[in-house]
Image (cartoon, grey):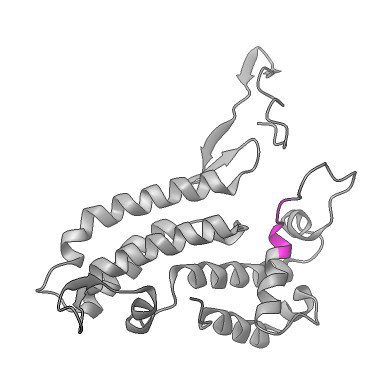
Amino acid sequence: MVMSRDQNVGRSKSIKTDNSYFKMEEEFRYLGTSLTNQNSVQEVIKRTLKLGNACYYSVQNILSSSLLSKNIKIEKYLNIILPFVFYGCETWSLTLREERRLRVFGNRVLWRVFGSRRDAVTGEWRKLHNEELSDLYWSPNIFLGIKSRIMRWAGHVAHMGEGRSLYKFLVVEPEGKTPLGRPRRRWEFKNIMDLLEVGCGDMKWIELAHDRDRWRALVNVVMNLRIS
């Protein structure tokens, strides 16, 4: 696979080694995640939510059962459904569209868990509003769960040091000219924005991450942010 913003790169080429030919692929799965030749996180999240939906529909009768408490249903959500969605999320750089998709998925599950509420004025049953779900749900929402995992993994990357390839891939600035068009949001830039959100934008995140106690406290702060 050749990764490039040019959709035509690598489509009609193949690699020969010894007497074997390997066809260039536009997408393939590796370690449970999908890789595309344009390095698109949208396709990864789309497939992740598809798996999450399949898991959700397999247990939706349990989540809506009147025989189980709300706490047990939430535990099912946290331990059965969310692991499908969180798999590999540490390397994501989310756009606003992907953030919305994730929140919509999380709210769909929580609506099933908490059920409907009778309107005090009309007397009719209605779905809970997002603010009401946020008040009833005692764990961080799905988006904050992903953000905290990204930051927690960022701390591990910072401690790897400059000699490790993974550190270089995520931190070192790429060389060469910037292509035309709006640049994609880099993983490191996403971390910086998260730090600005919790009021720590005056320091480089690499420096912050080397203080394990402070970095752990920052991760906890991110998990407890209130986002409507």
Residue 107 shown left or right of residue 36 in the figure:
left
Q: Residue at x 41, y 61 (%)?
A: 104
The one of 138 and 1 positioned closer to us in this rendering: 138
Q: Position of residue 156 (x, y in %)?
A: 65, 69
Which quadrant of the view contains residue 149? bottom right
Residue 64 position (above or below residue 39): below
Residue 27 position (above or below residue 88): above
* Magenta highlight on residue 166: no
Residue 6 position (above or below residue 144): above
Residue 164 shown left or right of residue 82 in the figure:
right
Residue 11 shown left or right of residue 179 in the figure:
left
How many numbered marks appear? 0
Q: Position of residue 63 (x, y in %)?
A: 20, 66
* Magenta highlight on residue 188: yes
Q: Residue at x 72, y 71 (%)?
A: 192
Furthest toward the top, the residue is 19
Q: Position of residue 46 (x, y in %)?
A: 47, 47
Q: Position of residue 74 (x, y in %)?
A: 28, 74
Q: Which residues are magenta?
A: 184-189
| Viewport quadrant of the N terminus | top right
Residue 111 shown left or right of residue 166 in the figure:
left
Which quadrant of the view contains residue 78? bottom left
Furthest toward the left, the residue is 67
The one of 4 and 158 positioned closer to us in this rendering: 4
The one of 32 and 99 positioned closer to us in this rendering: 99
Q: Residue at x 62, y 71 (%)?
A: 151
Furthest toward the right, the residue is 176
